[in-house]
Amino acid sequence: MIKKAIGRMSRMCDEAWYIFMGTLKLSCAMLLCSFMLLVSPQGGYERTMLAAALAETPQGLLMIALIVSALLEDRHG
């Protein structure tokens, strides 16, 4: 299953690959910011809530990017 998914990803068109990799980089940056907010010593309620929001958002972004990438792949054939 994983081998099949990696094989399909390696054959993605350039636009779909750009969207997927850009979203993956953005998600990693958001998770790093979330982690840094959680370990900061001046963490209050607002920072904790911001860190929680930054940790939850990448899941939705990746799902949207995968759907858009799949639509672009279908359009390119």
Image: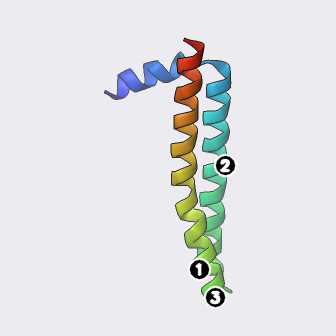
- The location of residue 52, given as percent across then percent down, is 55, 71
Residue 71: percent from left, percent from top: 55, 27
Which residue is labeled 3 in the image? 44
Toward the viewer: 28 or 49? 49
- SS type, badge 1: helix
Q: Mark 1 points at which residue?
A: 48
Among the two numbered marks 2 and 3 on one chain, the one whose residue lies closer to the N terminus: 2
Q: What residue type is labelled 1?
A: Thr
**SS class, disc 2:** helix
Q: Which amino acid does label 3 sit on?
A: Gly
* Spatial CA span between label 3 and label 1: 6 Å
Give the numbered dot on residue 26: 2
Residue 46 as seen in the image, left or right of residue 59: right
User: Where 32 sits versus 36, above or below?
Assistant: above
Figure disc tally: 3
**Image x and y of residue 73, in percent:** 55, 20
- Picture quarter with the N terminus: top left
Q: Is residue 54 above or below residue 28?
A: below
- Give the spatial CA distance, label 2 vs label 3: 25 Å
Mark 2 and mark 3 in contact? Answer it, CB < 8 Å.
no
